[in-house]
Amino acid sequence: MDNAMEPSAGGGDRVLVTGGTGTLGRLVVPRLREAGRTVRVLSRHRREPTEGIELVAGDLASGEGVDAAVTGAGVVVHCAGSPKGDEDKARHLVEAAARAGARHLVYISVVGADRVPVASAIDRAMFGYFGSKLAAERVVADSGLPWTTLRATQFHQSYLKVARQLARLPVVPVAAGFRFQPVDAGEVAARLAELALGPPAGLVPDLAGPRVHPMADLVRGYLRASGRRRPILPLPLPGKAARAIRFGANLAPDRAVGHLTWEEFLADHLAGGSQRQP
Ligand SMILES: NC(=O)c1ccc[n+]([C@@H]2O[C@H](COP(=O)([O-])OP(=O)(O)OC[C@H]3O[C@@H](n4cnc5c(N)ncnc54)[C@H](OP(=O)(O)O)[C@@H]3O)[C@@H](O)[C@H]2O)c1
């Protein structure tokens, strides 16, 4: 894989943002730029360079291109992620960052990573994400690099995606007893940028959205805002991970510090509340 732009060594103030093309990372990048930092973005895909942002092609799953990406980056903000394999991606990144002498590694994890047990095949199939985030957290903490990890609840965008998919069905299934606490990705990005600009802080207090909603209410809110009517069918989910979530392992009610609500997010994203989204 070729680099879209050859990174230069040195530059202790340069910040590498992995996942700088994703929902969260693309909101972190401008905040670091506004703070006067030179920003480099790692992506698997070659892209046209953008004003003031270095773009480096690489794949954290294979490790290809990662050494070049970390060269000269004093701070690494690790926002790249996918439903599976975040432990391996984190390992490739921290090993390269340690070789390059990075001063600070900032990681975004998920609330519940340490409380949702991924014990059985059923847990792994449905909630393996939590296990993979916890494993990645440990890779970061054991890296020997100074680090900061922030756990956030799921972003509004994630629920919107799920709600859109579920609303294609004539009857909308929801996980019985599940509650969620969606948070604004922009607010998480602002906190992550603040942490990246500060000293390494270890595991910092969670960042969660302003309200806890039963899953059925989140879906009802989407159906209402998008002008649809569907019956909702609560279904019990098996396994220890699902049980932990029914007991609130994915929530941080004492850290409900986010401001933007689900309803406000929907109003912003569904153009006045009546537009039907695909
Ligand atoms: N979404 C949520 O609700 C939520 C909540 C809490 C924490 N988080 C965490 O926040 C992080 C970002 O989430 P997001 O929602 O912004 O994700 P996203 O929109 O799906 O974006 C994923 C990003 O990861 C990059 N990426 C994926 N695999 C990669 C690989 N093998 N090598 C290099 N880059 C790779 C992608 O870059 P390219 O496609 O350009 O290569 C993309 O920029 C993740 O660690 C996630 O676990 C998310």
Image (cartoon, grey):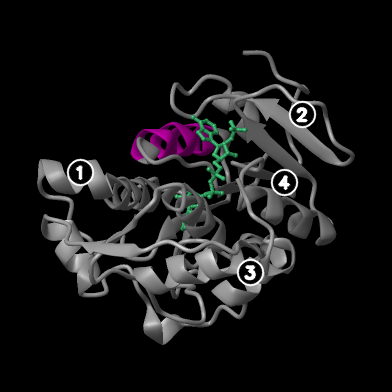
Q: For the residues marked 2 and 3, what is the alpha-carbon distance in whole angstroms?
A: 40 Å
For the magenta stretch, what is the residue range? 87-99
Question: In the structure shown, which secondary structural element does the residue marked by tag 4 occupy?
Answer: loop
Report whether 194 appears left or right of 168. right
- Inspect this view and state whether residue 180 appears: no
Mark 1 crowd level (few <14, some 14–19, many ≥20, 10 Å Cα): some
Q: For the residues marked 4 and 1, what is the alpha-carbon distance in whole angstroms?
A: 40 Å
Amino acid beneath label 2: Ser
On residue 265, the disc is 3
Amino acid beneath label 4: Gly
Q: Nearer the N terminus, badge 1 or badge 2?
A: 2
Image x and y of residue 178, in percent: 28, 69
Q: Quarter-wise, where is residue 11 in the image?
A: top right
Image x and y of residue 160, in percent: 53, 57
Q: Quadrant of the C terminus?
A: top right
Which residue is the extreme one toward the bottom? 254
- Inspect this view and state whether residue 190 appears: yes
Q: Nearer the N terminus, badge 4 or badge 3?
A: 4
Q: Nearer the N terminus, badge 4 or badge 1?
A: 4
For the point 43% across and 34% down, which residue is it?
89
* Dominant secondary structure, magenta: helix
Which residue is the extreme one toward the right? 51
- Kindly identify which residue carries mark 1: 124
- Kindly identify which residue carries mark 4: 12
For the point 14% across and 45% down, which residue is it?
122
- Look at discs 4 and 3 and give the one toward the viewer: 3
On residue 22, the disc is none
Amino acid beneath label 3: Phe
- Marks 2,3: beta carbons within 8 A: no
- Kindly identify which residue carries mark 2: 8
Mark 2 crowd level (few <14, some 14–19, many ≥20, 10 Å Cα): some
